[in-house]
Amino acid sequence: MLWIKTFHIVFVASWFAGLFYLPRIFVNMAQQQDPQTQKVLIGMSRRLFRFMTILAVPAIALGLWLYLGYGIGRGPGNGWMHAKLVLVVLALGYHHGCGVLLRNFEAGRNTHSHVFYRWFNEAPVLILTAATAFVVVKPF
């Protein structure tokens, strides 16, 4: 199980690296007026989103394997796992939201400012910090 846990951590960290970086590209796209540069940034975003999605799949699958293998989450004293699972669902929703925003950029329908994307970029930091705290501290 330690190998499963190791690969789970690696895939989660890699997935979150993409969740941190993609909205930064959105900031640049929201500020960019040059169509050629915009096209390059959209291409970068599309490739990064595809790669992030590939990384998210084993991260979630290995997490599920750990959850089922350890039997964590059942019984008293495992409220931290339920809270962490809520954060996993939020991370998946954020990932999906990034895809929606990317499709809007591709279609030329961006309706947000670069300031919105700067704030939007903070969500995965909060999710990862809270999830890590729940796993390490197990506060409830």
Image (cartoon, rainbow, N blue to C red):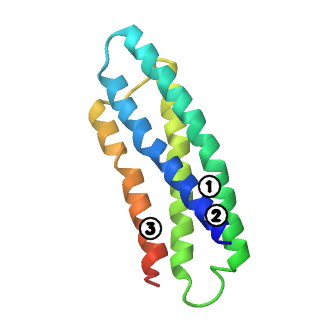
Specify the quadrant of the image occupied by residue 3: bottom right
Label 1 sits on a secondary structure element that is: helix
Label 2 sits on a secondary structure element that is: helix
Say what amino acid the circle numbered 1 marks.
Ala
- How packed is label 1: few (under 14 Cα within 10 Å), some, or many (20 or more)? many
What residue is drawn where x is 27% and y is 36%? 115
Say what amino acid the circle numbered 3 marks.
Thr
Q: Are marks 3 and 2 in contact (CB under 8 Å)?
A: no
Q: How many callouts does the rendering have?
A: 3
Specify the quadrant of the image occupied by residue 60: bottom right
Say what amino acid the circle numbered 2 marks.
Gly
Q: Position of residue 113 (x, y in %)?
A: 30, 30
Q: Are marks 1 and 3 in contact (CB under 8 Å)?
A: no
Q: Are marks 2 and 1 in contact (CB under 8 Å)?
A: yes
Check the image and report above or below for 71 versus 38: below
Check the image and report above or below for 55 versus 4: above
- How packed is label 3: few (under 14 Cα within 10 Å), some, or many (20 or more)? few
- How packed is label 2: few (under 14 Cα within 10 Å), some, or many (20 or more)? many
Label 1 to label 3: alpha-carbon separation: 15 Å
Circle 2 is placed at which residue position? 63
Label 3 to label 2: alpha-carbon separation: 13 Å
Circle 3 is placed at which residue position? 132
Q: Position of residue 107 (x, y in %)?
A: 51, 18
Q: Position of residue 90 (x, y in %)?
A: 51, 56
Image mark for residue 59: 1
